[in-house]
Amino acid sequence: MTKVLYKPLSLAFGVAGGVLAGVVFKQVWKVIAGEEEAPDATSEEYSWAEVLAAAALQGAIFAVVKAAVDRSGAVGVRRLTGKWPD
C-alpha cells in the first residue's frame, strides 16, 4: 500500500526537485562565473574547460537536490504511514 501511495508523490517530488535544482544552479553560476547563463555545449565563445566545468557543476547540483528531495519524500511517507517506501 505504501508503494502505491508513494509512486505519484515521488513523481511530483521529482518535478519539483528538477525545478529547484535549476534555480539553485542558476544562482550558484551567477556567483561563480558572474554571468546570468551557463554556457551551452555548443557555445563557440566558451572553452572546453568552461563548458565541461559548467556541466559538472550542474550535474552535481542536480544529483544533490534530487537525493535530498527523494530522501525527504521517503521520510515524509514514513511519518504519514509508519512504513518506509520500498
Image (cartoon, rainbow, N blue to C red):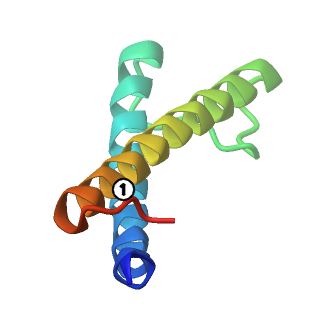
Front residue (pair 21, 81): 81
Instruction: Kindly indicate the quadrant of the structure image that contains residue 53.
Output: top right
Tag 1 secondary structure:
helix
Residue at the limit of the structure toward the left, as seen here: 80
Q: Residue at x 67, y 29 (%)?
A: 56
Instruction: Kindly indicate the quadrant of the structure image that contains residue 50.
Output: top right
Q: Residue at x 77, y 19 (%)?
A: 49
Q: Is residue 56 left or right of residue 7?
A: right
Q: Residue at x 76, y 46 (%)?
A: 42
From the viewer's perspective, is residue 1 above or below residue 33? below
Front residue (pair 61, 64): 64
Residue 69: x %, y % from top left = 37, 49
Q: Residue at x 30, y 51 (%)?
A: 75
Residue at the limit of the structure toward the right, as seen here: 48
From the viewer's perspective, is residue 24 above or below residue 42? above
Residue 78: x %, y % from top left = 28, 58
Looking at numbered disc 1 in the image, what kind of residue is underneath it?
A: Ala
Front residue (pair 56, 49): 56
Q: Is residue 46 visible?
A: no
Residue for badge 1: 74
From the image, which quarter does the N terminus lie in?
Answer: bottom left
Residue 29: x %, y % from top left = 44, 26
